[in-house]
Image (cartoon, rainbow, N blue to C red):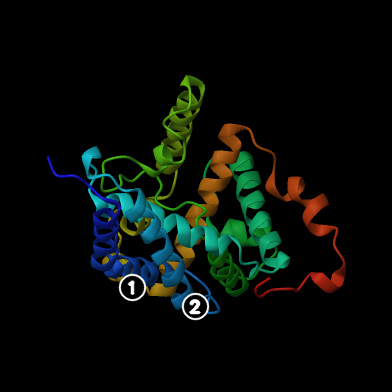
Amino acid sequence: MRMTTPRSRLKERDQLVISHVGLVKAMAQRLAQRLPSQVEMGDLISVGVLGLIDAAGRYKASTGVPFDAFARRRVQGAMLDALRDLDWAPRSLRKLRRELDSTIARLRHEFGREPSEEEIGAAMGLSEQDYQKALEQVRTLEVGALRQLDAPTPDGTTLIEVCIDPGEGPEARLEKAELREHLARALTELPDRERQILALYYEEELTMAEIGEVIGVCESRVSQLRSLALSRLRASLRASIGLPDPARAARPAADAEPAAAGGRGGRR
């Protein structure tokens, strides 16, 4: 039986890191496509490498989980944690997303069906051009909001499962199962084209441009429809889980700030 020394363990860790740096770069490039231009890909790679080093130090081959799958989860988590620490979105943009989600929820309740884009824009008092612009702006707020839906990861689990510690008790597992049911139901209620875009983007991992070629629209339109689909999902999940209207719930805390801070963006 071969003894594992601290030096040999360190060497194994370094080999894992060196051989998987390309994975970090690929994940950073893919994530950078969804982000505003002020987020540097080099920063994503840097924090991703730190996540990779941590994964290599924790990895145990005896578990039977491929290192690629083990590392992906931690690298992505490190990148998303870093992004959450950036306050690059102005509060006016967050308010716009709450208004969009709230409008979709209200119209769904009134009509008993998914509202059309024309109905949503009209209810928000936006022209067609301004509505399309609003969807494009909302896209920048989607970092980590709904990463992989219910798609399986390389080791066979789903990201909804990953969000809950396996050591938690039966109540947490029941909540997880109920959340998956709510999400599955919300997905079935989406318009066909929006559901197809989410499937191609999150499950097949196609780029916006590739999806545009598949469904016959331009890349920017794919981006807009994905933003709309995610807003529909948020509204549907809030209704089915029983959460309050996002616009009313957030108004006291988010909107009662000095006017001078309202347009603040950039990094903290």
Q: Give amino acid for label 2.
A: Glu
Residue tagged by mark 1? Answer: 209
- Front: mark 2 or 1: 2
Secondary structure at badge 1 equals helix
Which tag, 2 or 1, sits closer to the chain's start? Answer: 2
Q: Name the image quarter holding residue 261.
A: bottom right
* Residue depicted at x 85% and y 73%: 260
Q: Give amino acid for label 1.
A: Ala
Q: Which mark is residue 40?
A: 2
86 in relation to 266, above or below: above
Q: Position of residue 202 (x, y in %)?
A: 35, 55
- Can residue 136 be seen from the camera position used here? yes
Left or right of 64: which side holds 34?
A: right
Q: Name the image quarter holding residue 105.
A: top right
Depth check, front residue: 22 or 2: 2
- Can residue 32 be seen from the camera position used here? no
Instruction: Estimate the spatial distance between the alpha carbons at disc 2 and disc 1, rounded to whole Å.
Output: 21 Å
* Residue depicted at x 25% and y 52%: 67
Q: Position of residue 223 (x, y in %)?
A: 45, 67
Q: Position of residue 104 (x, y in %)?
A: 60, 50
* Residue depicted at x 62% and y 72%: 130
107 in relation to 52, above or below: above
* Residue depicted at x 55% and y 79%: 38
What residue occupies the far left of the structure in this picture?
A: 1
Left or right of 130: which side holds 223?
A: left
